Image: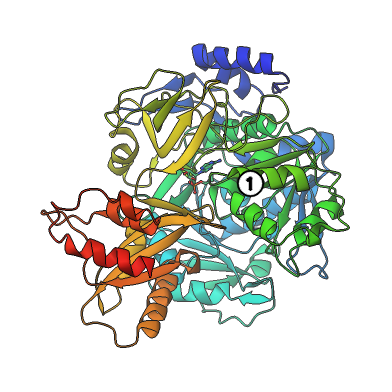
Amino acid sequence: MLQRISSLKEYQTTYKNSIEQSENFWSEVADNFLWKKKWEKVFSGGFEKADYKWFEGGKLNITENCIDRHLEKFGNKTAILWEPNNPTEQNRKISYNELHEAVCQFSNALEKLGIKKGDTVCIYMPMIPELAIAMLSCARIGSIHSIVFGGFSAQSIADRIQDAECKWMITADGCYRGDKPLYLKKIVDEALEKCPSIQKSIVLNRSNFDCNMKADRDVWWSDIMKDCSTKHEAATMDSEDPLFILYTSGSTGKPKGVLHTTAGYMVYSTYTFLNVFQYQPEQIYWCTADIGWVTGHSYIVYGPLLNGATTLMYEGIPQFPDWGRWWEVIDKYKVNIFYTAPTAIRSLEAQGLKFLEGKSLESLRVLGTVGEPINEEAWEWYHKNIGKEKCPIVDTWWQTETGGILISSLAGVTPVKPSFATLPFLGVEPLIVDANGKEIKEIIAEGNLCIRKSWPGQARTVYKDHERFIQTYFTTYPGMYFTGDGCKRDYDGNYRITGRVDDVINVSGHRIGTAEVENAINEHLDVYESAVVGFPHFIKGQGIFAFVSCEPQPKDIILFKQEVLNIVAKIIGPFAKPDRIEIVSGLPKTRSGKIMRRILRKIAEGEFDKVGDVTTLLNPEVVEEIKKKVKG
Ligand code: PRX
């Protein structure tokens, strides 16, 4: 049985052991899974070449651990509870037996189409059980899923397909988000015009929307499932075989295809789910994220299923039909563990308490947050009004690259402190470094957050670009993994994440590279150059501020700004649209021509007096002009 830490003392002793005897510790955790062949070496490699490996020589299939091994004991237990967007539509309950049949059948269908071990498959689907079935089936046959969040544009899908060299696509006709239809197949059709590598596109009929099925390329999900057996022998995978690619934004260049492998990710997502949420058998668990982001991968699908839990999937948005929907869903399914993002909490808080009237929420035991720093006010609101002051809140800090939670309290077991992620998870050794990369050893510290040694859930590479992987994460501070986050540590050793220290902004928990937005804006013919920075936003945590210099000057400013928004939505997706655009006569630059984003950041934050010395700039006069515009 996997060890569930149940007291602070046990956490402290196990933590010490997990660091000092790391290989023994992880080996004992990994013993609790179904292996086709046991590993030969627990850990090897290091950060210098980023060649670390976990459980080398082991053979397994993650879906046998997610599904098959639960069947004998609790095959009839609900694996996935699905709540549709529209509350009047029938919900669905899928047992572990049913999930097994569906995954086996779809795995057979994928193999019949010719999809092989090691092939990359792009998935662009609504939040419906078939999305989980598609990803698990990919894993079952040994292909690598690359899921693209349903809010991304055709261009972003095409970029990701091309980068990952996907030959296969899985999508749906479309869905409703609230009362708004989302025509996924149409978006995919546009993307696939630029992707000749795609051999077949599998389309699920979710909403009976008209679909233009392209002969020889598009096939219906239901057609390919016909005549396929509901039995399937899972492929034998090596521990270090790739499981999935997930694109994420960084400071520079295009989004990176972060690659996770099989065994380490499995062990880590299982163990963190169990201990952070203190999951107990028979509890109902709900994470409101989208499966298109890492939170959905690790804590809607893999982590919960690996623990044999019942995981709730909700197709819609929090405000449909009204802002009370989430509370209704919690009461309807008697949800015990609820995991969401600070942005959502702030949006719900802004609606006042009227949508909580008549909702009991008494089933709740544990609350969680993820994706961005949570401010104290939102924390208190969540604690008081949702947790009724009796549910511990786990503020979980982690990243696409970490595969699972690295810093968080363990619900009800280790102390909480509002706005602090608190203590490291077992086997995780955080450290804080100053600007020169020197570790700050004093207990009270502030600086950049790094991790000293590898943990099993750590990403292994950037797909097809290992050099970029090393450059991005392991060269800023040699010998350590650099997270890109700033952080503080208090007297008790609690960590508080203060936000990104690189050119990445976190908008409603969505990670957006400023360079990506700038590149999109620069596509407008009137734009000479642009600079994008984040600024504090009451609901979203951070908003996007775009400073744009134009040549020629736009005649109609309102129209111009609308065009810029449209371009960003088209090239990246609507969620990356700037909140504010200012047209300026020039951007502040150093004599060598580098844009001084630091100055723009201060101005966007309203800290006009803190821009510092501008006299050495190439064009100091623009700073005053920009300040005036922004103040105005
Ligand atoms: O800045 C941190 C922030 O989200 C970044 C990672 O984003 P992404 O890879 O999209 O994964 C998000 C979900 C795991 C981090 O570098 N972040 C995530 N969780 C927290 C957080 N910031 C503060 N507190 C958190 N709990």
Indicate the position of residue 267 as horizontal and vertical percent values.
Answer: 59, 30
Which x, y percent locates residue 540? Answer: 54, 57
Task: Specify the quadrant that holds the C terminus.
Answer: bottom left
**x and y, in percent, of residue 614 in the image:** 19, 53
At horizontal 65% and vertical 36% (from top left) the residue drawn is 394
* Corner quadrant of residue 380: top right
In this orientation, which residue lies closer to the viewer: 215 or 245?
245
User: Which quarter of the picture shows residue 229?
Assistant: bottom right
Q: Residue 206 location, x and y as percent?
A: 69, 70
Disc 1: CA contacts within 10 A as few (<14), some (14-19) or many (>=20): few
Horizontal side of 147 relative to 590 (left or right) equals right
Taking depth in this image into account, of 625 and 478 the one nearest to the observer is 625
In the image: residue 330, left or right of residue 581? right
Amino acid type, mark 1? Glu
Residue 482 position (above or below residue 579): above
State the residue in front, 338 or 349: 349
**In the rendered image, which quarter is residue 571 located in?**
bottom left
Which residue corresponds to mark 1?
Answer: 377
**Quadrant location, the N terminus:** top right
**Residue drawn at point x = 70 percent, y = 47 percent:** 381
